Structures are given as structure tokens and as C-alpha cells.
């Protein structure tokens, strides 16, 4: 990937304000994440097998913010993507400490 393509990614720190399971969608969590935009961003993420919703609230996560909205159906529209890694067969969010919402990831 050319560096210019990578540089266009809007990666920011977000703080998970709320999280809940999506009814009838076992893999999905519905998150509200403060990414410094003034209003929480809705992110639908397929990490429900690895996290209970309450485990995520308050975490500082890395969010890809400039993706086009993705419609999951039934009014579920995601406005970004959490970055994750697979550790020992389990999906883990990439987290940071002591960074304000909206802090750019370089």
C-alpha cells in the first residue's frame, strides 16, 4: 500500500460511552464511542463473542473514523470501525491509556 493511501486513514482514540448486544444478532455489539466529534459515534462491531458489553464501557480504543457508513439492516448503521487483534484465538480491542477522545493515531 502506498504511504499516501495509509496517510488518508483517520485513526483516532475513542472512549466507549455505552455498549449493548444487538437483539437476534449474536456476534454484534452496538457501541456509542466518543471520538471527539461532539456527539458519540455509533459503531456496530462483531466482537460479542469476545466481550460482554460492560467490559468495553470506559475503554479507550482505536477507531477508523473515515469509512462510509455501513448498513447492517433494521436501522443499524455503523459510523466507523474498531481496530482489533487476534490474541490466542480471541479477538481483542486495541486500547491505549491516558489519551483524550479524538487524539489522532499516527
Image (spheres, rainbow, N blue to C red):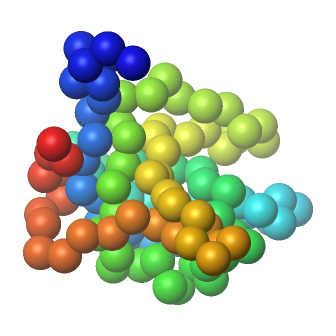
Please indicate whether residue 66 sits to the left or right of residue 28 in the image: left
Residue 99 position, x and y percent, is 12, 66
**Residue shown at 46% from the left, 66% from the top:** 93
**Residue shown at 60% from the left, 38% from the top:** 77
Seen from the viewer's position, the closer of residues 102 and 87 is: 87
Please indicate whether residue 18 sits to the left or right of residue 38 in the image: right
Up-down relation of residue 86 to residue 67 (above or below): below
Up-down relation of residue 41 to residue 69 (above or below): below
Residue 76 in view: yes
Residue 80 position, x and y percent, is 45, 40
Up-down relation of residue 99 to residue 104 (above or below): below
The number of discs equals: 0
Residue 19 position, x and y percent, is 53, 71
What is the quadrant of residue 1 in the picture? Answer: top left
What is the quadrant of residue 49 in the picture? Answer: bottom right
Please indicate whether residue 8 sits to the left or right of residue 23 in the image: left
Residue 21 in view: no
Up-down relation of residue 20 to residue 101 (above or below): below
What is the quadrant of residue 13 in the picture? Answer: bottom left
**Residue shown at 59% from the left, 51% from the top:** 44
Seen from the viewer's position, the closer of residues 13 and 31 is: 13
Residue 9 position, x and y percent, is 30, 29
- Single out the residue that lies furthest toward the right: 24
Q: Quadrant of the C terminus?
A: top left
Amino acid at each position: 500500500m502506498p504511504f499516501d493511501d495509509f496517510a488518508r486513514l483517520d485513526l483516532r482514540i475513542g472512549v466507549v460511552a455505552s455498549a449493548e448486544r444487538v437483539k437476534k444478532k449474536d456476534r454484534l455489539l452496538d457501541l456509542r464511542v466518543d471520538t471527539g466529534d461532539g456527539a458519540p459515534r455509533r459503531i456496530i462491531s462483531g466482537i460479542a463473542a469476545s466481550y460482554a458489553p460492560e467490559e468495553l464501557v470506559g475503554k479507550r480504543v482505536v477507531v477508523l473514523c473515515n469509512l462510509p457508513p455501513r448498513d447492517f439492516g433494521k436501522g443499524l448503521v455503523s459510523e466507523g470501525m474498531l481496530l482489533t487483534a487476534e490474541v490466542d484465538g480471541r479477538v481483542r480491542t486495541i486500547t491505549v491509556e491516558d489519551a483524550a477522545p479524538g487524539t489522532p493515531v499516527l
